[in-house]
Amino acid sequence: MKTIIIDNLEWQLDDDGIKRNWKDSVIYATTLRYGWRLPTIEELISIVDYNTHSPACKIDSCRSSFYWSGTPYDHYRDYAWNVNFGYGYVLNYFKDYHYYVRCVRPVAEES
């Protein structure tokens, strides 16, 4: 898997092209092992590039589409936060909707 490091986080360079509901997205991230997970909504927002659009993303291979975060929406347990990288919109939607996933993990510290 190719990766990119942005602000002490290692990101998947490419998503796998499969849209998943939120629960399946969380499961997918755990299958990658080695600390991979869905990004928090704050981490996902950190790769938005508001100086551009379609996609509004610091990662060139990002789609102009929705990506799940691992952050549930506090007010409705059936919703979670996501980012639409078309313009960088931050929204929350029903966890059964199918969106892309770009996993993240902390940069491994060198010993």
Image (cartoon, grey):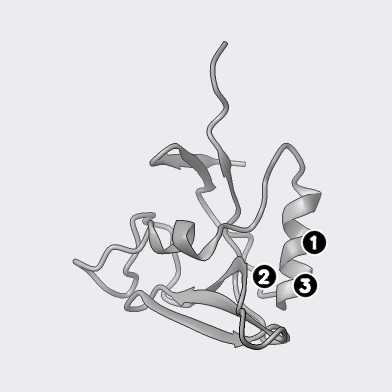
Q: Is residue 46 left or right of residue 79?
A: left
Q: Is residue 23 left or right of residue 83?
A: right
Please tell me how crowded label 2 is: few (under 14), some (14-19), or many (20+) other residues with Cα within 10 Å.
Answer: few
Q: Determine which quarter of the picture holds residue 74.
A: bottom right
The nearer-to-camera label among 3 and 2 is 3
Cα distance in 3D space between marks 3 and 2: 14 Å
Looking at the image, residue 14 lies above or below residue 34: below
Residue 23 is tagged as: 3
Q: Position of residue 99 (x, y in %)?
A: 61, 77
Residue 52 is tagged as: none
Cα distance in 3D space between marks 3 and 1: 6 Å
How many discs appear?
A: 3
Amino acid type indicated by mark 2: Ile
Question: Which element carries disc 3, helix, strand or loop?
Answer: helix
In this view, the residue in front, 26 or 32, is 26
Quarter of the image that includes the N terminus: top right
Q: Residue furthest top?
A: 111
User: Residue at 69% across / 83% down in the picture?
Assistant: 95
The nearer-to-camera label among 1 and 2 is 1
Q: Marks 1 and 3: in contact by CB < 8 Å?
A: yes
User: Residue at 53% across / 54% down in the picture?
Assistant: 14
Please tell me how crowded label 1 is: few (under 14), some (14-19), or many (20+) other residues with Cα within 10 Å.
Answer: few
- Residue at the spot of label 1: 27
- Residue at the spot of label 2: 18
Cα distance in 3D space between marks 1 and 2: 13 Å
Q: Is residue 88 left or right of residue 94?
A: left
Q: Residue furthest left?
A: 51
Amino acid type indicated by mark 1: Ile
